[in-house]
Amino acid sequence: MSEIAAKAPTRPRRRLIGSRLVPYLLLQALIVIVTILGLRLLQPSDPDDFAVSGFSLREDGASRPVTLPHFTSSRYSLSDPPLYTGTFTFRNGDAGWSVFLPRFSNAVEVAVNGVVVLDSRRDANANRPDRNTPQIALIPASLLHDGDNEIAVRLFVWGPLKGFLDTVYVGPDAALRPSYETRTLLFVTLPVVFSAWQSILAIMWLMRRREPVYGVLAVAMVLGVVQAFVPPPVPPATTSRLAAVLLASAPTESALIVVFALLFFGWRWPRYGALLFVPGIVVFAVGLVGGPPLPRILFLVLGIPMVGVCLLLMASITATQVVRRQDAASFTLGCAVTIVLTCWVHDMLSVFEIMTNERIFVSRLSYSAMLVAIGAGLTWRFARALNQVDSFASQLVTRVREAEERLKASFAREEERARAAALANERTRLMRDLHDGLGGQLVSIVALSERGHESSGITDAARAALKDLRLVIDSMDDIGGDLMLALGSWRERAAAQLRPHDVALGWHVATPQGLPLHPELRPWHVIQIVRILDEAVTNAVKHAQARHIVVTIETLDDGQGDGQENGQGPRGMISVADDGKGFALPGNGEAGSAGQTARGLRNMRSRAARCGAVLDLASDSSGTRVRLQLPKIFPDSDAAATG
């Protein structure tokens, strides 16, 4: 039963793999067929009417007739190159003629009637086997004569492959030139264009330096660009050993592409993955030590098979990725690998002379399909990342909007709570002020009336109660932070209070602005300040027996104020001075007696502290001075001030 249960989950998985892998493999088979047909259809149509295929070949001291295309028997023939001689027919009156060579390896020298008209060794890039570079040259009219003309082709071969000469065409330039231009476009211009595309893919690493996958891709692309643009040596000229090994760096480039695929698809690096770089390292090391011929030989022996191994690994990686995820990047890259692998097999058939009628290497040209697939994969990943960013951005906008709505609701609730707390605090303050002031006066009136006192005492108590009531009501007025308005109302009440006692009230504003504005000023601040001033005036009348009271109002600049906030900005100062007999103060600043005067001074200090103000008392035989130094900023709440 346990074995049956273990096999049960594997069956659907195998069916899923089969349902994905079989269509993919069928598609790759179709791509192979299309690629083979495309290689046939893409072969340029040469002007067969002007073909010269019958030649006499002199090679290794022997002569024999051959038919082009032809492979030489020698791999190295620089001192005694194979010489192909033949004839072509020219008719007087024809337009300018040219000689056209579609394909050769490695270099050719063409002579017409004994005069050299073409030497490909003058252009190093024309002698690269992987470029399939064609050559064309105009034949001067003075060299041609009516009838048969002789043409001789020397083929210079420096291995490691055998020499090859394709069909030679001699005829009017107008008939041969289109075929030459078509071959140049396919086998020269397009590889250069795709090499430039490689350099663009390498530049992507500059924008994503922290991701190893783009660094590996950049190194591979740089090697491809170097192979495309480094000029190959043309014997007997020598070249640097570094250039020779860079020209044979295809196995290293292929290994890097495999590493890129593994990292791109998020796979772990295999334990024996470093073995992929062994052939490239061998070619590089031996080429640097032994010189230019060795990299070409090792490239044929090690490099080309290693490229095939890397292509097979790429095919396996992409097929596995398609089965696992079926994403666009792996699918596109897998199709490109199939195209390149098919072209690699085609080139191997040419190398081993299984295809005896041509030698056209198309692997480097088909590598463009790999570049396009890599670019498409990167574009697909970029587009997917943009979609994810857009989705995340839309989700973020939605969440921010929801959070904003919740925050607005929270702010509204907090504002309502703050408003309710402010109303409660103001209600408590009014109740306390009415209880402390008006409530005490009303109790005194009731007590006087019950005891049968004279009406004058009741009247005085009622006036005091009315005074407290007016003080509470006046403190509720909106004065816009200007304490001078509240002091103006207090001045009128104080003058009316002192008039029956024949006490003169002096009013002196020492600075033009009076007191600074305080936007944070609240009604309870005003009540505390006014009651301090009331207490100072009452003490001057009842206890000091003063005849003159002077109130001075001024603003102190920085550094002129006293107290803990000294030097923090302009601060208001209110002084009340009388000419009474004064009283004695102990060292701590409180009255010496424990009577009503001492309680009044303690209340004054307490009220000043609640407002954040500083109260200073000075008394001697010449009078008493009460100085109230206002804070720069009044405290927000009564509790904060008292704390």
Image (spheres, rainbow, N blue to C red):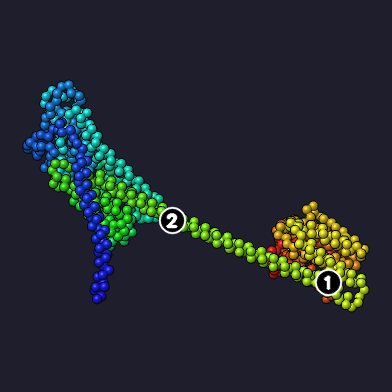
The amino acid type, in three-letter code, at marker 1 is Gln
Q: Amino acid at mark 2?
A: Ser
Front residue of this view, candidates 305 and 535:
535
What residue is at 91 percent from the left and 75 percent from the top? 453
- The answer to whether 618 is drawn above or below residue 112 in the figure is below
Q: Could you tell me which quadrant the N terminus lies in? A: bottom left
Asked if residue 316 lies left or right of residue 613, the reply is left
Q: Quadrant of residue 240?
A: top left
Residue 255 occupies quadrant: bottom left
Q: Quadrant of residue 474?
A: bottom right
The location of residue 8, given as percent across then percent down, is 26, 70
Q: Which residue is mark 2?
A: 391
- What residue is shown with label 1? 441
Q: What separation in Å lies between label 1 and label 2 (alpha carbons)?
A: 73 Å
> In the figure, 16 relative to 374: above or below?
below
Residue 113 point in image, percent of width and height? 14, 27
User: For mark 2, does the 10 Å Cα neighbourhood hold few (<14), some (14 to 19), or many (20 or more) residues?
Assistant: few
- Direction bottom: furthest residue: 451
Residue drawn at x 31%, y 61% is 268
Q: Secondary structure at mark 1?
A: helix
**Marked residue nearer the N-terminal end (1 or 2):** 2
Residue 286 on image: x %, y %: 23, 51
Q: Secondary structure at mark 2?
A: helix
In the image: residue 639, left or right of residue 290: right
Position in image of residue 124 (x %, y %)? 24, 38
Label 1 close to label 2 by CB (< 8 Å): no
Residue placed most toward the observer, 235 or 594 = 594
Residue located 74% across and 65% down the image: 524
374 on left or right of 429: left
Query: What residue sits 19% from the left and 49% below the top?
Result: 345
The disc placed on residue 507 is none
Say if residue 298 shows up in the picture: no
